Amino acid sequence: MALISFFSAKGAPGTTSTAMLTAALWPRPTLLVDADPAGGDLLMRLPTDAGMALTQRPGLLTLLPLARHGLAPGVVLDHSQVVQGGQRVLVGLDSPEQAEASAAFWPILGRNFHDLPGTDVVLDLGQLSVRSSQMSLAERSDMLIGVIRPTPASVLHMRQRLTALTRTLATLGPDAPLVGLVAIADVQQQAEASSALATVLTDVPEVHHLGMVAHEPRAERMFHGDLLVRPERTMLVRSGRSLVERVRSLLDGAAPDPDPAPAGRGADQVDQAGPAGSGAQAGSTDAIEAGDASGLPDGGADAGAAQKEQPDADRPMSRRDLKKKKWRVQR
Ligand SMILES: Nc1ncnc2c1ncn2[C@@H]1O[C@H](COP(=O)(O)OP(=O)(O)O)[C@@H](O)[C@H]1O
Ligand SMILES: [Mg+2]
């Protein structure tokens, strides 16, 4: 299924919120993954469907150690939680130390996300650079989307970052993800946002113009757990729908992948050999939690239980599922 990743170059332009908006409005079931190596935010933002606080377990912390042995299709869903409104999320790590301790497992995760049966995956990669371990997730994506604000700093940093990223991604040839750019801007700032997008895209013409998402603080509060009456009427949701449409048409227009698990990517090889083959140590939940990357045991007994496939992963969404889906956004 599709893997769509959001990233920023610097600052906090709205990467997490835009990923949440996209996951909420996407027309198929989605898993929203908090893969920000600086530490995830979802945990702090939303309660569970039952009104309880989200916890780090289950989440990336419980999933990553299992990746040592490769991951069965669909196993990531066993480590997800459902938040208020019905969105399925995979809660992130809580510090850069945890992210570093688990760096060897990201390529395996990337392949698993990409091949997840019945569910599209929306990733929040946080700040991305060609050297970050999140690059393996970016490379696996079908679409990689940069988020900017219409400010000189945001534009210049993204222009630099996209220049470096597109150069690196070009080495993947036909397996390279599509790359897009979206600007978060007030309705009154449309001219500035257009010129911000144009300024970046002049230097990286292969990057797709994905338009704007409305900067609308009151509506955006729904992504911090606040209830919102008729969100579908807000500019935020309307602009989010346009973003989803553009991404979908670009993905639909891309040449279909005849082989769901294409060979020839680095991550495949790592997946089969296990990260030990890449010189890395395995990490347990405790060790990752402590930010310790060295000499760690594997996921142990949890692994077997968590490796089972989702029984209904390929089931199409029912009308009831659709109604229940995601925050309170009506699609
Ligand atoms: N579309 C939006 N409208 C209004 N406020 C937004 C929007 N997107 C993000 N924000 C706000 O901007 C800040 C940064 O957003 P966040 O999604 O956390 O950015 P990042 O993930 O890039 O750090 C937060 O305070 C968030 O509430
Ligand atoms: Mg964020």
Image (spheres, grey):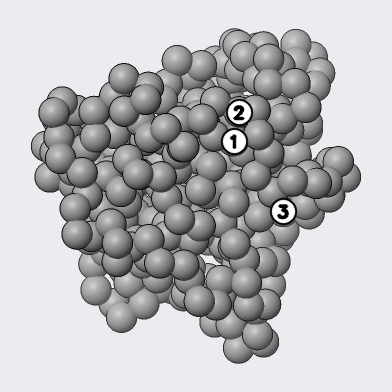
Q: Residue at x 69, y 49 (%)?
A: 260
Mark 1 and mark 3: span between their CA atoms? 19 Å
Q: Which dot marks residue 244?
A: 3
Neighbour class for label 3 at 10 Å: few (<14), some, many (≥20)? Answer: many
Residue sitting nearer the eye, 205 or 263:
263
> Sequence order check: which comes first, mark 1 or mark 3?
1
Mark 3 and mark 2: span between their CA atoms? 28 Å
Q: Position of residue 134 (x, y in %)?
A: 45, 29
Q: Quadrant of residue 278?
A: top left
Are the residues flagged by discs 1 and 2 in contact, CB closer than 8 Å? yes
- Ligand 2 neighbours mark 1 (CB distance < 8 Å): no
Q: Quadrant of residue 254?
A: top right
Q: Position of residue 103 (x, y in %)?
A: 33, 29
Q: Which dot marks residue 140?
A: 1
Q: Quadrant of residue 78?
A: bottom left
Q: Position of residue 274 (x, y in %)?
A: 38, 35
Q: Quadrant of the C terminus?
A: bottom right
Q: Nearer the viewer, mark 1 or mark 2?
A: 2
Label 2, on which residue?
Answer: 265
